[in-house]
Image (tube, rainbow, N blue to C red):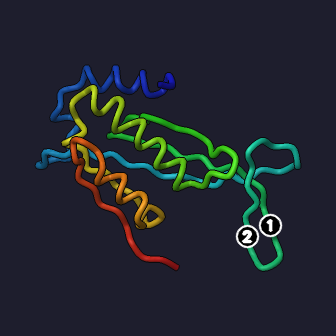
Amino acid sequence: MPWVGRHAERNIGQMWRGDLQIPDTPFVAVWADGSFLEVEGKRFDSTKCVKKSQSQWVRGQICAAAFMGPWMLSVDFARGRECEETVGRRILDEVLEGPLRRQRLTKNALVLLDSLYGDAPPLKQLEGYREKPSYIVGVGGP
């Protein structure tokens, strides 16, 4: 596990559980999101080209992270042909099957994801966890 996750897990383990919960609920909020980071130049590893307008393409890198309360549990960049959803799903596995499971928080997790994750693969993934975390996933498209 990357150092950011180890650091967050150590701190989470020292916190009173009530401080981690959404007030007046049994849930701890866990969310993942990503960003397209625009870059300039031509020599970047794992960069993407995205059409910004009718005639303009931009190069950049996709980064996604997962959080619980004030803690960043995982962060990673897209590899090869990965997209934000793929990176987000990978780090959700890392977080829910790692620090949250070890801290016995997975069944209390309320996973919050935007509409990018509102299709079959992410929903099957969320339904497939042994501890069955609750989740809210945005839906809708352009």
Q: Position of residue 101 (x, y in %)?
A: 27, 32
Q: Can you tell which quarter of the image residue 105 is in? A: top left
Q: Residue at x 70, y 47 (%)?
A: 80
Q: Is residue 122 left or right of residue 14?
A: right
> Which is nearer the eye, 82 or 65?
82
Q: Is residue 81 above or below residue 139?
A: above
> Which is nearer the eye, 110 or 130?
130
- Mark 2 is on which residue type? Lys
Q: Is residue 80 left or right of residue 74?
A: right
- Are discs 1 and 2 less than 8 Å apart at CB? yes
Q: Is residue 69 left or right of residue 64?
A: left
Q: Position of residue 134 (x, y in %)?
A: 23, 53
Decide: few, some or many residues near mark 2? Use Cα within 10 Å; few <14, some 14-19, many ≥20.
few
Q: Is residue 16 above or below residue 136?
A: above
Decide: few, some or many residues near mark 1? Use Cα within 10 Å; few <14, some 14-19, many ≥20.
few
In the displayed orientation, state which residue is furthest to the right: 42
The residue that label 1 is drawn on is 57
Mark count: 2
Secondary element under disc 2, as helix, strand or loop, is loop
Instruction: Name the disc covering residue 132, or none.
Output: none
> Which is nearer the eye, 37 or 136?
136
Q: How many angstroms separate mark 1 from mark 2 (CA)? A: 5 Å
The residue that label 2 is drawn on is 52
Q: Residue at x 48, y 27 (%)?
A: 4
Q: Is residue 110 above or below residue 118?
A: above
Q: Position of residue 120 (x, y in %)?
A: 40, 65
- Mark 1 is on which residue type? Trp
